Amino acid sequence: MWPRCSPAEKALLRSQSGRNNARALTAVPCDPALQLPNERFRVVLARRLRLPLLLLNSRCEGCGARLDALGDHYSACMRTGRIQARAKPVERAWERVLEEAGASVHFQHLLQNTTLPCDPQDWRRVDVLATGLPLYRGRALCCDATMRSPLKANGAPQPGTAKYDGATFRVAEREKKVKYQDVDACSLTELLVLAVEVGGRWNDTAGDLVRRLAEHKAANENPVLRRATQRAWEDRWWSLLGVAAQGALAASLLAQTGHNLVLDAPAAWAPELNVLLDGQRWAGLE
């Protein structure tokens, strides 16, 4: 099948591969934050199978281009507001993950309100600022979440995405390090670019953060349960992140207009350890 795929199809297949890429489809819906409405679930399936969607518009409200039935244009067009709107649920999911791991979390925090040497007119915000964790040498974690499409708005693959896994991540990380150059260089902070592609692939930084958080969360448990507890927290957090990312993408595609579109993340509750381990059993993890 692979040799017969077009460059765009190869780019999307790579975007749909990798660890934890399909958590939106395998999450146990025991929490409002782990549930997808029927119409969004259908969009997630259709996108993975490259089946056509019934969109409510024939032309893009941002640039006027003719829309494709696969949702590729809306996934990449920056002029509609859809890409900006779909970011918030993912940012909220990372906020929830860090809170459950025990961090003190600040959402959309202005850099000028920290002790970093910033201009008073600097209006840059950090998506999630987390402190109080003994990770990354105790530095404050400045997390910037982003979702990238391996395809351009015209359906052509982004450079390198048909040949290399996660090619969009290198671009995203380079852009964020330029934007937050002072944060990246500061000895008090650790800049973490937490990137996901529309197909579900996560970058290595996101994978490393979830693993470290789960190890920290399970460190004080009984040694007999420590490994199972770590795996259970990892499973929960990847499910939260996967459902948030794919649900937000689906909602942004289904909306009639992207202008002033607001997507809110559902509230989540942190389970007790016995409930968490029982959820791991139902998920069929080893």
Image (tube, helix red, strand yellow):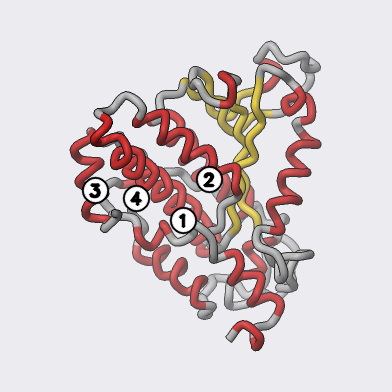
> Callout 2 environment at 10 Å: few (<14), some (14 to 19), or many (20+)?
some
Label 2 amino acid?
Gly
Quarter of the figure that contains the N terminus:
bottom right
Residue in front for this viewpoint, 226 or 164: 226
Q: Which residue is mark 1?
A: 20
Are the two marked residues, 3 and 1, in contact with CB atoms closer than 8 angstroms?
no
Left or right of 71, for residue 220: left
Q: Which residue is mark 2?
A: 207
Which mark, by number, is residue 273?
none
Mark 4 lies on a secondary structure that is helix
What is the spatial separation of the Cα atoms under label 3 and label 4, in whole angstroms?
Answer: 12 Å
Mark 2 lies on a secondary structure that is helix
Q: Residue furthest front?
A: 223
N-terminal of the pair, mark 3 or mark 1, is 1
N-terminal of the pair, mark 3 or mark 2, is 2
Are the two marked residues, 3 and 2, in contact with CB atoms closer than 8 angstroms?
no
- Nearer mark to the viewer, of 4 and 1: 1
* Residue 4 percent coordinates (x, y): 65, 88
> Callout 4 environment at 10 Å: few (<14), some (14 to 19), or many (20+)?
many
Left or right of 186, for residue 50: left
* Residue 173 percent coordinates (x, y): 72, 44
Label 4 amino acid?
Leu
Q: Which residue is mark 4?
A: 34
Are the two marked residues, 2 and 1, in contact with CB atoms closer than 8 angstroms?
yes
How many numbered marks does the figure carry? 4
> Callout 3 environment at 10 Å: few (<14), some (14 to 19), or many (20+)?
many
Q: Which residue is mark 3?
A: 279
